[in-house]
Amino acid sequence: MELNWQDLVIPAMSFCAGFISALMMGLKDKVTEIFFSRSGFQVYTNSSDVSFEIMGELERIDSSAQKTIRKGSTGMELLPVDQHGTSTEVILVNYKAVMPLVIATYENHHTRELLCDGADGYIAEKTNELLQVTQHWKKRFPNLTKDYIADHVCTWTKTALVPALRKACNEKINFYKSLLARTNISESVKVKIKEWLAKNERYIVCIDELNARSGIQYRTSIIMKGENDGNG
C-alpha cells in the first residue's frame, strides 16, 4: 500500500498532541508559558524566577541611586555657613531647604517628572518648593530670591541628581540588554523588557537635556559639606 504525506499528517499531529499533553502533565505546576514558532515550540518554567531577578536588580540599582542623591542633597547649604555663620536661623533655613530635595529622592519620580514636564518644568517645580519652605526668612535673608534659589536647585541637579540618575539608567539599560540576549526568558517577558529598555533610553535623553539646560551653572558660593575634608 502506497502512503503519501497526507496520510502521515493526522498520526503526526496526534503524536505531537500526545507528547505535548504528557509534557504539560509532567510540568503542569511549573509551566508559565508555551511559545510556538515555525521552528517548533518552547516551554518556559522560570518566568516567576526571572521576575524576581528583575525586581531584585532594579531595587538594587534604585537604592544605590537614592543613597547617592541623598548624600549629595544633605551636603548642600542654601545659606553657606562660612558666609552666614551657624546661627539657629541659618541652620533651620538650610534644613528646610534640604527637605524637599531629600523627599524627592525617596519619592524617586525624577525621571517620570522630567519626561512629563521637561527640564525647565522640573527645575521650576523644585524651585517653587524651596521658595515655599523658606518664605518666612526672606526679610531676615534678603538674598533668598527666586533667582538665588533657582540657582541653588540648578547646582543640586548638576552635582547630586544628574550623575546618579544617568548611572542608574545606564545600569538598567545594560541589564535589560543582557536579559534580551538570554535564551531562557519567555517571549512575553522579553516584550516587557523591550518596553522598559526603550523607556530608560528616553530617560537618558531627558537627563542629558536637564544637564545641558541653559542657566545650570556651578555657583561658587554654594559649599558642599565634606568637599574639602575628603568626605565627598
Image (spheres, helix red, strand yellow):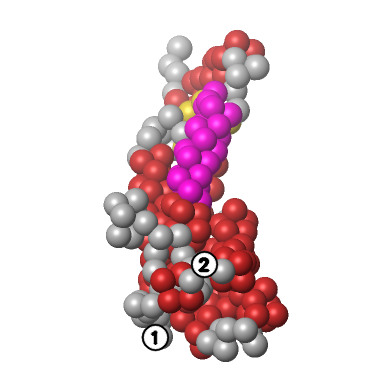
Q: Residue at x 65, y 80 (%)?
A: 137
For discs 1 and 2, the disc positioned in front in the rendered view: 2
Q: Is residue 81 left or right of residue 87?
A: left
Q: Is residue 33 left or right of residue 81?
A: right
The amino acid beneath tag 2 is Thr
Label 1 sits on residue:
214
The amino acid beneath tag 1 is Ser
Q: Quadrant of the C terminus?
A: bottom left
Q: Nearer the viewer, residue 155 or 21?
A: 155
- The spot of residue 75 in percent (x, y) is 45, 60
- Check disc 2: other Cα within 10 Å, few if <14, some if 14-19, many if 20+: few
Q: Nearer the viewer, residue 48 or 163?
A: 163
Residue 178 appears in which quarter of the rendering?
Answer: top left
What secondary structure is found at the residue carrying circle 2?
Answer: loop
Q: Quadrant of the N terminus?
A: top left
- Check disc 1: other Cα within 10 Å, few if <14, some if 14-19, many if 20+: few
Q: Main secondary structure of the magenta part?
A: helix
- Eyeballing the image, is 168 above or below 9? below
What secondary structure is found at the residue carrying circle 1?
Answer: loop
Tell me if residue 55 is in the magenta stretch.
yes
Marking on residue 86: 2
Q: Which residues are magenta?
A: 44-67
